[in-house]
Image (spheres, rainbow, N blue to C red):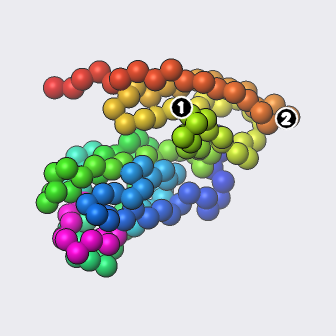
Amino acid sequence: DAPKEPGAAMSEAVDVQHKNFSPFITVITTGGTVTFGNKDSLTHHVFSPDVQGWDTGYLQKGETRARRFDSKGAIALLCNIHPEMLGYVLVIPSTSFGRVGSDGRYVISNVPTGSFRVTAWVPRMQASTQSVTVGATGAVTANFDLRPAAPTN
């Protein structure tokens, strides 16, 4: 819940290439736009069960479609033609976020001083939220213990 930096994380691109969404997870702030592009010779049809009534329509090679996301949350991306395809758009209310590296660490830069909630999100895991206070040094450590999400029927 850190404040939004004007203009940051307002546009991202998700490409379909080799029947994969790239990047697998895209992070954007609320009100931001994601452009979906097809780099495959195959036709794709991107949709999400998490966004009622939305899909890109058929995307031929080289075509793009854009979608603005105004509500926060995790949005699964699927393809009507290729059921094995899966990706995510994570819409967050802030422009402060980090990605976990191969060493299991992450950094969130340029967070102002103050108290905030920080949430760790991973597909198929329960999101975990902690409160942190950023002081004058700007250095804070927050470790997360993530657990599998409860199954849904």
Is 54 located above or below residue 124 in the figure?
below
Please identify the quarter of the rendering in which residue 79 is found. bottom left
Residue at point 85% right, 35% down? 137
Position of residue 46 in the picture relative to residue 67 (left or right): left
The answer to whether one can see residue 65 in this image is: no
Q: Where the C terminus falls, by quadrant?
A: top left
Position of residue 103 in the picture relative to residue 114 (left or right): left
Q: Secondary structure at mark 1?
A: strand
Please identify the quarter of the rendering in which residue 105 is found. top right
Q: Which mark is residue 119?
A: 1
Q: On the image, numbered disc 2 is attached to which residue? A: 137
Give the residue type that dot 1 points to: Thr
**Between residues 48 and 82, which one lies in front from this camera angle?**
82
Residue 87 position within the rendered picture, expressed as x and y whole percent measured from the top left: 33, 50
Residue 113 position within the rendered picture, expressed as x and y whole percent measured from the top left: 78, 36
**Between residues 54 and 59, which one lies in front from this camera angle?**
59
Residue range (magenta): 36-46
Q: Earlier in the sequence, mark 1 or mark 2?
A: 1
Residue 140 position within the rendered picture, expressed as x and y whole percent measured from the top left: 73, 29
Position of residue 90 in the picture relative to residue 151 (left or right): right
Residue at point 39% right, 59% down? 22
- CB atoms at circles 1 and 2 under 8 Å apart? no
Q: Secondary structure at mark 2?
A: loop
Q: How many marks?
A: 2
Give the residue type that dot 2 points to: Thr
Using the numbered discs, state the Cα–Cα distance from disc 1 to disc 2 in whole angstroms. 21 Å
Residue at point 24% right, 52% down? 85
